[in-house]
Image (spheres, rainbow, N blue to C red):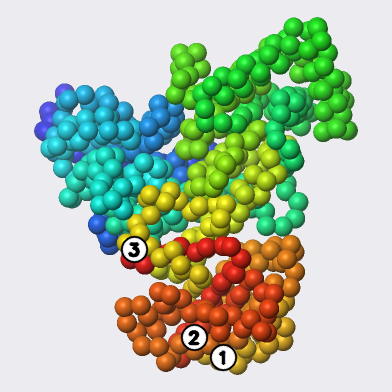
Amino acid sequence: MGKKPNLKQLAAKAVVTDQYKKQLNRVKSSGAETNCIEDAVKDVLRNLPAAASNALVIYGDPQSGKTEMMICLTARLLDEGSKLIIHLLNDSIDLLTQSLDRFRDAGLAPAPRDASELADSPIPTGQRAILFCKKNTHDLSKLINALSAAGPRIVIDDEADFATPNSKVNKQQQTKINELVGNLIGTNGKYIGVTATPARLNLNNTFNNKTETWVQFRAHSAYTGQDHFFPQSGQVPYRLEKLTKPATQEDAQQALARFLVTVAYLNTTATAKAGEKNYTLLVHTSGKKDDHAADRKAIEALMNALMAGSGNAFDALLETIYAEARTLYPRADASTLTSYVVANASRSAVIVLNSNRVRAATGATPTTPKCPFTVIIGGNIVSRGVTFPNLLAMYFTRDVANKLQQDTYIQRARMFGARGPYLKHFELTIPAALYDDWHRCFVFHRLALEAIKNNQESPVWVGDPRISIASPSSIDRQTVNFDKGEMSFQIFDFPDAQKFDDIVSADPTSIATLKKLATAIEEGMPPYLIKYIDAALKKDPGTLAIHTASSIAKYTSGPDVDVDAISRTKGFIGNPQLEPTKFPNAIHHVKIFHNGKGKARVFYKNRRRVHFVKNMK
């Protein structure tokens, strides 16, 4: 028998190491990419020490893999010596369960825990812990008490722009959630907000975060998102059913029939060799629970009619299914598809996903389909965080009477994700006007984010009379300029003004000229701006004005002007710069301003009812 080791020394060295490497290997073994994760994690570690008030924001597209990134980030922070990492989530049991399951399945050490398990047992200083807490006053208050002696912590706030910002900022008061999250961070903690819609965090000055230290999480190459579902031009690569009149029960019935037929096709023809798969139709018509109950009743009545196998309702639905099969898949056997639907109608589930749902009946993971025909009727939870694997169709008719809130509707794009294998079979049924509004939400959002990438200053956020940028109560009116009528992009080298003016003067109203100018400028003009203007010109031809360059060398730097940065609080494009006599019909104005020191910026102004908002802090 060998000599007994020093057990205390043995215990002191018994620490799980290289967790980050293990997590990256886990992701790679699943066939997924890790370069986007590695870039984001590297940038967080670089930027967090310099972040104002130890607060940093990570932003990325909806459904682009941010949860996987947060798992890997947590592993890296543990490797770097962090003891206590707290993940905050929206106040939803479904979201908490989904997130905890994914983190636990990843095999992190220590094992992630629900913060409510702590009860009143405090965590001592130095004890390693990964905790998950819902953003409500009860859970946050209990967690703060349990961590009173736990020492420094890192708070990772998923969907950080929801609930956390102080919506009483203009009343010189503080919302309870904002106060509690601040108390949880404490004086020596660090805050990492994660979201697809960071505008509210910027305009609210939440925990004094600064865009200079924001980190972009790029989507993986298999991601299907804005460019697929809301392209600037060309045909959409999926089935888009636009409703030109108010949605009716007949519209819903036809959408259900198309979903049933599509599942039948995928499971008998397109992917039959891989075996059957379960798919989801997401129905989102309202935020009201009574409406959810009515939707469920209507859908269950249709499925019951199919299972009955006879009767007037069965005959009518059978005719609809057969007709849709012939229309959608003319090369397939419509009889085979119809037979599959009827034979498997009993393998269906209708789930209402709101705060009233019976969890014992729907299971711990209700968004993962357990039947070939799964219909999920969603409430407000659809807007935030929850992932829908194998989502094949959306029936989305929830509109608003006045203004769409940009961040809310961007978050409702639950169809984004890795839908590539069946993207051409995916269907979105939506009122035409709502689709157009939703499309503009994403266009405006992308314009702002494009300006952040290489332009280390606060972005200009874009809205219009139909689309609000963020909740008005959350916008800090002491620091935000609502009259910022233009947006600018990355500084670039500008050694020869005549070279650029010659390009412009050749044809100052042509999109071809703008493209030539962009080639000469390179990174100083984002491609998305050109795509946006190009698409707009197809609807309103002759509305582009590209102006020759102007110098700001005569300006004196001060509180409102920075000559080196080519920045001015009130902007540079006034009526004289618009040249209304030369360009009387122009809506889209593009102009270069240079500082006489070999540097310049591109500025863009939209004369239509589009407004620009910027945090000047």
Q: In the image, what residue occupies the spot 62% across and 16% down?
A: 297
- Disc 2 crowd, CA 10 A, few/some/many (<14, 14-19, 20+): many
Q: Given this view, does label 3 or label 1 mark the residue nearer the observer?
A: 3
The reply to whether the C-beta atoms of the residues labelled 2 and 1 are less than 8 Å apart is: yes
Reading the image, the residue beneath label 2 is 594
Q: In the image, what residue occupies the spot 67% across and 53% down?
A: 231
Reading the image, the residue beneath label 1 is 497
Tell whether 505 sits left or right of 442. Answer: right
- Disc 3 crowd, CA 10 A, few/some/many (<14, 14-19, 20+): some
Q: Which residue is at the front of the view, 156 or 534?
A: 534
Q: In the image, what residue occupies the spot 47% across and 38% down?
A: 384
As helix, strand or loop, the secondary structure at mark 3 comes to loop
Spatial separation of the CA atoms under disc 3 and disc 1: 35 Å
Tell whether 161 sits left or right of 150. Answer: right
Q: Which three-letter amino acid code belongs to the residue tagged 3?
A: Thr
The reply to whether residue 118 is visible in this rendering is yes
First in residue order: circle 3 vs circle 1: 3
Q: Position of residue 206 (x, y in %)?
A: 32, 52
Reading the image, the residue beneath label 3 is 479
Q: Which three-letter amino acid code belongs to the residue tagged 2?
A: His
As helix, strand or loop, the secondary structure at mark 2 comes to strand
The reply to whether residue 47 is visible in this rendering is no
- 315 is higher (above) or lower (below) than 217: above
Spatial separation of the CA atoms under disc 2 and disc 1: 9 Å
Tell whether 116 sits left or right of 151. Answer: right
Q: Given this view, does label 3 or label 2 mark the residue nearer the observer?
A: 3
The answer to which image quadrant residue 479 occupies is bottom left
The answer to which image quadrant residue 8 occupies is top left
Q: Which three-letter amino acid code belongs to the residue tagged 1?
A: Ala
**The C terminus: image quadrant:** bottom left
